[in-house]
């Protein structure tokens, strides 16, 4: 137990780290107040530095699908760590891990491990550009694929214009070959391809959006991405860093029965340790060094301790776990909808499996334009009241909340009761 409160720690942290955090969303800037400094976590709960316990729906932003500190994962990590932390050399467990991923993702014939989702998407785009010899890439407004320069793009003024940098330090030149289009809008994608198809290297998409809240792909949207890419010789990249092994064993692509050309995975596959993956068609992946001319490397790529956590997590993700996630997700969705109804609050709940968002927007929320119009002030107020009632909900209106296999019916019902009170 920390001997300091979150407020003490936050005050000191801000002297050493920008905003007192190692990743911006953790600073609670979107909801106000002092971020909870976590001291420990187990199952569906986290314990703050102040000693207060919360029911956790951040789940480390996705990795904690089994709940925190699953004994079998901890045991696997400890056993691996006892044999050394990092070798900078190949290990048998990386082969086992690669095989485990390939067995879950038929579209992934070959893969490379990296240490973060950012590295995975950045590398996948480099493969697409290297393989096609083309420069243009397409992403979708409101989607987040990590902080690689070419992906930090705000939608251009019109669908037909290039993106604009969404961060200082990212040059206009860097994003001059990135288009950002509206999610769930096949028409704008068709327009883009008819004008630029021969120059397009890749389209990267969150197959279920989680970074503008939870938004499901509308029928035909993902299919159009794949078919338009195939028609024009471009690469369809599914960024499944959030959805991979969460929405099903084979992620969103299994759920929707689709086969992208490249896939990025992270979060769940590392079980909470720094481990991510990019992979796909063999003819693409065989162009990567040392086999081919596309360079990508990493000191800690495929780290044996991280791989141990990933393997243990994947092994525990049984069909019963996915059934549990669906049951709990449905229970929470129904409860939050009841809370909105009973308090006559304008809002909507959107869920896919164990990813869920309550929007202060009448709904449906189909894309960034809708999500960004939701009532952020109302969300911030609701978030603070939830926190006061022992519920740790993602501190941003534009994030998905994550349900784990460790959330009990009691946790869900307690959350619904707190959410109802917080809406009054
Ligand atoms: P990382 O580099 O943070 O491991 O992964 C980047 C990334 C890539 N693709 C998708 C679909 C993602 O959701 C992410 C990261 N997600 C955010 C939360 N929405 C991580 C939390 C944070 O930035 O602190």
Image (tube, rainbow, N blue to C red):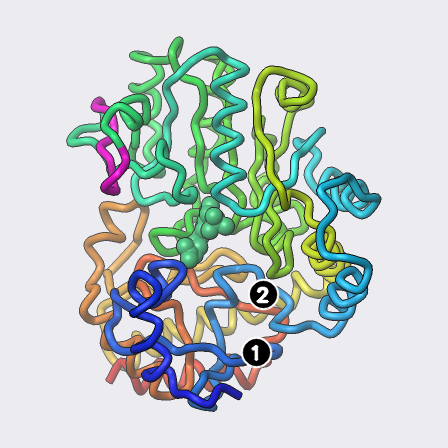
Say above or below: 395 vs 365.
Answer: below
Who's the residue at 30% across and 52% down the image? 365
Residue lying farthest to the top in this orientation: 198
Magenta span has 321?
no
Q: Is residue 152 above or below residue 160?
A: below
Q: Secondary structure at mark 1?
A: strand
Residue 314 in sight in this render: no
Instruction: Locate residue 337, reporting x and y percent.
Output: 37, 71
Please name the residue that numbered disc 1 is placed on. 41
Quick check: 270 left or right of 169?
A: right
Asked whether the residues under the numbered discs 2 and 1 touch, taking CB atoms below 8 Å apart as contact, a structural biologist would say yes
Check residue 64 in the rendering and tell me which mark sits there, or answer none.
Answer: 2
Viewed as shown, does residue 6 lie left or right of 375? Answer: right
Residue 197, image x, y percentages: 38, 13
Tell me the CA gap for discs 2 and 1: 10 Å
Q: Which residues are magenta?
A: 160-170
């Amino acid at each position: 137990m920390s001997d300091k409160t979150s407020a003490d720690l936050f005050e000191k942290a801000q002297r050493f780290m920008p905003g007192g955090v190692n990743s911006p969303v953790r600073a609670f800037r979107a909801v106000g107040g002092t971020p909870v400094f976590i001291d420990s976590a187990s199952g569906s709960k986290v314990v703050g530095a102040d000693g207060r316990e919360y029911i956790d729906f951040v789940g480390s932003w996705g990795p904690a699908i089994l709940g925190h500190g699953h004994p079998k994962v901890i045991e696997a990590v400890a056993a691996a760590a006892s044999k050394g932390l990092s070798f900078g050399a190949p290990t048998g467990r990386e082969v086992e891990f690669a095989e485990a991923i390939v067995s879950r993702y038929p579209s992934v014939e070959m893969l490379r491990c990296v240490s973060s989702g950012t590295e995975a998407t950045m590398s996948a785009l480099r493969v697409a550009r290297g393989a096609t010899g083309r420069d243009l890439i397409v992403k979708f407004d409101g989607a987040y694929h990590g902080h690689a320069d070419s992906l930090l793009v705000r939608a251009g003024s019109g669908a037909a214009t290039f993106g604009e940098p969404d961060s200082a330090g990212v040059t206009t030149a860097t994003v001059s070959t990135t288009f950002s289009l509206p999610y769930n809008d096949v028409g704008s994608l068709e327009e883009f391809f008819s004008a630029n198809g021969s120059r397009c290297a890749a389209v990267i998409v969150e197959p279920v959006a989680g970074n503008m809240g939870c938004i499901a792909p509308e029928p035909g949207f993902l299919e159009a991405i794949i078919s338009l890419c195939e028609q024009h010789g471009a690469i369809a990249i599914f960024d499944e860093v959030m959805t991979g092994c969460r929405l099903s064993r084979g992620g969103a692509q299994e759920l929707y029965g689709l086969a992208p050309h490249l896939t990025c995975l992270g979060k769940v596959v590392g079980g909470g340790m720094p481990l991510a993956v990019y992979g796909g068609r063999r003819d693409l992946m065989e162009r990567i060094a040392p086999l081919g001319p596309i360079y990508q490397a990493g000191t800690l790529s495929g780290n044996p301790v991280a791989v141990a956590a990933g393997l243990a997590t994947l092994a525990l993700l049984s069909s019963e776990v996915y059934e549990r996630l669906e049951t709990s997700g449905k229970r929470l969705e129904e409860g939050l909808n009841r809370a909105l109804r009973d308090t006559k609050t304008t809002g909507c709940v959107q869920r896919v499996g164990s990813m869920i968002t309550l929007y202060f927007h009448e709904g449906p929320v189909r894309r960034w334009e809708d999500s960004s119009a939701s009532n952020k002030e109302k969300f911030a107020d609701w978030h603070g009241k939830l926190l006061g009632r022992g519920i740790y909900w993602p501190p941003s209106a534009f994030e998905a909340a994550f349900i784990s296999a460790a959330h009990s019916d009691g946790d869900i019902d307690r959350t619904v009761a707190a959410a109802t009170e917080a809406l009054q």
